[in-house]
Amino acid sequence: MSALMRLQVMSIHGIFFDGKAQAVIIPCDDGDREIMAHHEDMIFAIYDGELRIQDENGEWTHAVISIGSCQVANNRVIIMSNTVERPEEIDVSRAQEALDMAREKIRQKNSIKEYNISQATMARALSRIKTASKYNS
């Protein structure tokens, strides 16, 4: 059996995962980052994308995660995010509507702040659609 670490994944809606894990793969600004047992201590930002957790039995759990942060210290990983959703919980039609509305707002050439909000909304919607399609087929 592989070495294990303690992993907690929390969102504003509650605890998504709390237990031992072999690995966790987290979306970051420069690509995915894999954390395994006894990883060096660090703190980093999480971006919208797919979260993958390999539990102590080697089984993989997939989810869509939004912006947040990750702290790695003393063989313990704590992930805090706005939202974490399993692929089967995603309403693809609602995500598509959010994507369409964000695209329309970008076309309207509003303020920089509104543009950045629309970009973030698009990224989240695309992550939700992609992950739901990948695992709900």
Image (spheres, rainbow, N blue to C red):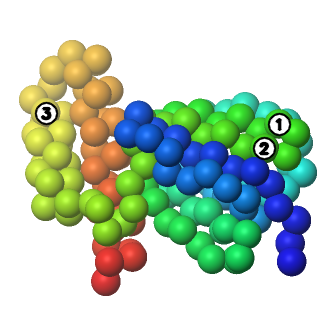
Locate residue 113 relative to residue 105 in the image: left or right.
Answer: right
Q: Mark 3 points at which residue?
A: 105
Question: Is the residue under label 1 in contact with that under label 2 (CB below 8 Å)?
Answer: yes
Q: Give the structural element (helix, strand or loop) at label 2.
A: strand
Q: Give the structural element (helix, strand or loop) at label 3.
A: helix
Quick one: label 3 or label 1, which is nearer the N terminus? 1
Q: In this view, does 71 lie above or below 95?
A: above
- Report the amino acid beneath label 1: Ala
Q: Among all residues in the image, which is located at the extreme bottom?
A: 137
How packed mark 2 is, by other alpha carbons closer than 10 Å (few <14, some 14-19, many 20 or more), is: some
Question: Is the residue under label 3 in contact with that under label 2 (CB below 8 Å)?
Answer: no
- Residue at coordinates 84% horizontally, 56% vertically from top-left? 37
Locate residue 18 relative to residue 106 in the image: left or right.
Answer: right
Can residue 96 be seen? Answer: no
How packed mark 1 is, by other alpha carbons closer than 10 Å (few <14, some 14-19, many 20 or more), is: few
Q: Give the structural element (helix, strand or loop) at label 1.
A: strand
- Report the amino acid beneath label 2: Arg
Residue 57 percent coordinates (x, y): 71, 76
